[in-house]
Image (cartoon, rainbow, N blue to C red):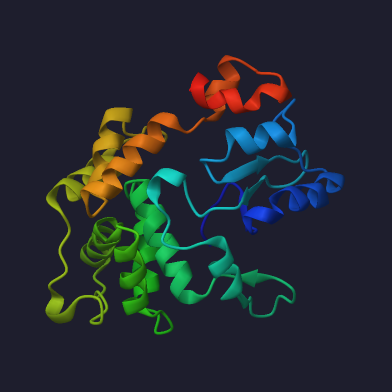
Amino acid sequence: CRSFADLDVMVAPDDVTAAYRALAPRGYRLPEGMTVRTAKAIYRGLGAWPLTHTHRYPIDLHFRLCHVSFGSPLSPQAVIAESRELDGVPDLRVPSATHAALMLLEHASKHLWCTLEVLLAIARVMEHDDVDWLGVERLARRSGTFSGCAAGLVLASEIFGVKVPDSISPGGKLQARDDLRAAAGAALLRPVGVFADRREEWRAHRATFDGLRSRLRYDLCRVLSPTPLERAWYKLPESMTPLYVPLR
């Protein structure tokens, strides 16, 4: 029953071009005038190619779980390898319960928990008994993103009255950082379609990381990774696509 604007399809990084070539005859297209080579340069950091269709939902063709600056706790290969069939829908695979829970927590922290819908989704996942919460914690800590995941669990618990799983919060001691609470509160109070400015977003994103190394990685990637804005500002010939990095 959740609303959505596009469909996310995950493929291994080496398969993204082949996947696009399979979708193109069915009417899916990269942004106007963009070639595969340009897409590889522009969307390398973002981790997904946005594909549109005249009569169907857009598809985000993911070859990474999130922007390179966030240091994903999961590789696409791992998600695909441990995926499961969706009940009652043959040939359609979805992430395992544990991977889905971790992806939800990471995605929510990236967007600063800006809707009650995403916090309700976390609360519902916390009630599932098929999630390996110790595995979630281990993967999040390994990628330096546990602070943001913990904040999502605590916020969902407090707002919707569900218990944080004992395996990840023995004795109910899991805490959310004050600056992340403040960021979530500010995001939830904004009108629909109004989001944090770039400085607020930068401060909150850095707070979701566990250590200095993760924060420095985020800063460096945020500055250097090309985005569609560079192409909108100046469209380079296909043979010069590597120059989008210095152009950035």
| Image coordinates for residue 30, horizontal then vertical, percent | 72, 36
Asked whether residue 192 appears in the rendered view, the answer is: no
For this rendering, which residue is in front, 22 or 97?
Answer: 22
Asked whether residue 159 appears in the rendered view, the answer is: yes
Count of numbered badges drawn on the protein? 0
For this rendering, which residue is in front, 243 or 153?
Answer: 243
- 93 up-or-down from 76: above or below: below
Q: Where on the picture, by quarter, is residue 76?
A: bottom right
- 140 up-or-down from 233: above or below: below
* Picture residue at 17% right of the left edge, 69% below the top: 174
Relative placement, left or right, of 20 versus 84 is right
Q: Where on the picture, by quarter, is residue 84?
A: bottom right
* Picture residue at 76% right of the left edge, 38% below the top: 29
Q: Where on the picture, by quarter, is residue 51?
A: top right
* Picture residue at 60% right of the left edge, 53% below the top: 63
* Picture residue at 40% right of the left edge, 66% below the top: 102
| Image coordinates for residue 180, horizontal then vertical, percent | 20, 49
| Image coordinates for residue 246, horizontal then vertical, percent | 50, 22
